Image (cartoon, rainbow, N blue to C red):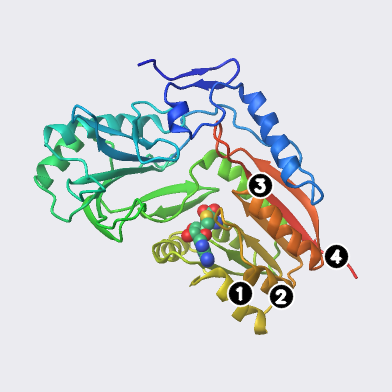
Amino acid sequence: MAQSSFNEADRSIHCPYSEKCGACAYAGMTYEGELKVKDAEIKKTFAGICTFPPINGMYRPVYYRNKVHAVVSGDKDHSIITGTYEEGTHNVVAVEQCMIEDKQCNAIMNTLRKLFASFKYKPYDEDSKQGFIRHVLMRKGFSTKEVMVVLVTGDIMFPSKNNFVKALLDEQPEITTIVQNVNNMGNSMVLGSRNKTLYGKGYIEDALCGYRFRISPSSFYQINPAQTEKLYKTAIRMAEITKNDTVIDAYCGIGTIGIVASKNAGNVIAVELNKDAVHDAKINAELNKVTNIRFVNEDAGEFLVDYAREKRADVVIMDPPRSGSTPEFLNSLLQIQPSRIVYISCNPETQARDLQLLLKGGYQVKETAAYDLFPHTGHVETVVLLSKVDK
Ligand code: SAH
């Protein structure tokens, strides 16, 4: 099969899997061309709402993903393959080299495939519920060089566990932790709820904007740290936070934005639904000796409805998942009336929908920015600053 390649001159990638894999919608296009398409899409999505300056692209838009996921499956000849689901199907496309994933993780994946075969581990079959290995998830701290390998298995039983761990570390000694995640559910979720640390501390740490963060297997962490730093810096600058301000960091994940924002704030209240992420977030505050932040493990909408009844906030930074925020959250926001709202989004469609509600509720757009966190794919990240319209 043809090798994937990167063209330095036009910063395009050429990938033999791109058509079947579907992740890189702009594979083959020059990166300049891709950024222009992304600008045009943003313009169309926010027509009548706000305008954006040109999107901030990456200098070298390859191997940028610090998180790598692969499905483990059997080929027609029963050899083990790792890869991704073919777009819209449950067929697995074998991927041996990915242009947007970290190179070291790619090499570890190749070792894993070889070891799965030599240890005679069978890929898990979703229909018959037979077999052992379901998925591999890897995360790397680009600043710390820590690497976590999560082996998702259909069963807690791990045959020849110690020998396998030893063989993996012999070939890939830079791995800092190995976790077994048991997923015996019949759904499309990658991770089950049970983690068992086989080697190391069970999580990795990374550094971002001068702070250190712990990341567990199931916690959300931005996949492109170089671009994320730029995005966070812009979002926090936009918020113009002072020591008199109460700041809400909604959909906070492991607390990254709230912790970075806490430096200039009076106090920060951060809310997040995922229990493991909140656990990480609390440790992250301690790790960074941040004492003016408090974490709430709750649905952001439910939290804000209660909060709006009696409390006030000066700044709300919100970074919801792709589905966007909820009317519950947004209406409570309108009740609280913070002087600044910074809305970060990985899905312009839902952000545009939510902005319309905020504009009707007495806010205006003051500044916007877009970052390409996901080069070659169809995704973009946008950030919008809103302020109250003076009456
Ligand atoms: N601000 C963080 C995380 C952004 S991703 C960062 O930059 O790293 C969105 C986060 O919203 C995820 O951590 C997800 O677990 C969380 N989330 C999803 N639905 C939620 C809800 N209803 N209430 C609160 N948090 C939610």
Visible residue check, residue 377: yes
Q: Are marks 3 and 2 in contact (CB under 8 Å)?
A: no
Visible residue check, residue 240: no
Query: For mark 1, does the 10 Å Cα neighbourhood hold few (<14), some (14 to 19), or many (20 or more) residues?
Result: many
Q: Position of residue 62 (x, y in %)?
A: 50, 28
Q: Which residue is painted at 65% across and 48% down in the image?
A: 348
As drawn, is 50 to the left or to the right of 323? right
Q: Position of residue 206 (x, y in %)?
A: 43, 47
Res. 227 mark: none
Q: Secondary structure at mark 2?
A: helix
Q: Which residue is painted at 26% across and 37% down in the image?
A: 73
Amino acid, disc 1: Leu
Q: CA distance from mark 3 to mark 2?
A: 24 Å
Q: Are marks 4 and 1 in contact (CB under 8 Å)?
A: no
Amino acid, disc 2: Ile
Res. 336 mark: 2
Q: Which residue is painted at 43% across and 32% down in the image?
A: 21
> In the rendered image of this protein, does residue 362 appear above or below residue 118?
below
Q: CA distance from mark 1 to mark 2?
A: 9 Å
Give the labeled residue for mark 1. 304
Give the labeled residue for mark 4. 389
Give the labeled residue for mark 3. 382
Q: Position of residue 322 (x, y in %)?
A: 56, 53
Q: CA distance from mark 4 to mark 1?
A: 22 Å
Q: Secondary structure at mark 3?
A: strand
